[in-house]
Image (cartoon, rainbow, N blue to C red):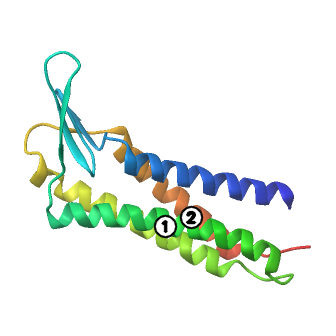
Amino acid sequence: MLLLLLGIIILHVATLVLLFVSTIVSSWLVGNNYSADLWQNCTGGAGNTWNCLNASSSEWLQSVQAMMILSIIFSVLSLFLFFCQLFTLTKGGRFYLTGIFQLLAALCIVAAASIFTVRHTDWHKDSANFGFAYILAWVAFPLAAISGIIYVILRKRE
């Protein structure tokens, strides 16, 4: 049972790390001499100088920003609730509340990544490739969903 709990905690922390990195790092879109994320657009200048401007204030980008922040909040809250329920839940009880918050985090991730996938051409019309932070967001989605399902199924044992 201890190994199972340790595995679940490692899965949850890995999901949190992926969420933090994908939200903060400036690599959602990359191209020749530019890089863009949810917060700013950076273009390369002469030498190693980069000129960064705030990201567009369009509604779809703000919704992606909000969904990614909400996913982090739900996932952190889920981890906190897991530790609280681990010590207060009665024997045989299920971690429903923890699982629900982690599944909400997964829904926020998939909503944010889906909106960005569909609408990124409104933002950058030239050739752009998805960066590694965008891919990390998509990788975080199934991990969050799997850990949420595990939490719902998991029973507390003595």
Name the residue at 62% across, 53% down. Answer: 13
**Residue behind mark 2:** 76
Q: Between marks 1 and 2, how big is the CA–CA gap?
A: 5 Å
Task: Specify the quadrant of the image occupied by residue 70.
Answer: bottom left
19 above or below 1?
A: above
> In this rendering, would 157 be left or right of 130?
right
The amino acid on which the numbered mark 1 sits, given as a three-letter code, is Ile
Residue 11 placement (x, y as % from top left): 64, 54
Q: Is residue 90 above or below residue 64?
A: below
Q: Quadrant of the N terminus?
A: bottom right
Q: Position of residue 51 (x, y in %)?
A: 17, 33
Q: Quadrant of residue 52?
A: top left
Q: Position of residue 58 (x, y in %)?
A: 14, 62
Q: Are the two marked residues, 1 and 2, in contact with CB atoms closer than 8 angstroms?
A: yes
Report helix, strand or loop for mark 2. Answer: helix
| Residue at the extreme top of the image, as rendered | 47
**Residue located beneath label 1 in the image:** 73
Q: Residue at x 17, y 67 (%)?
A: 59
Crowdedness of circle 2 by 10 Å Cα count: few (<14), some, many (20+)? some
Task: Report the amino acid beneath label 2.
Answer: Val
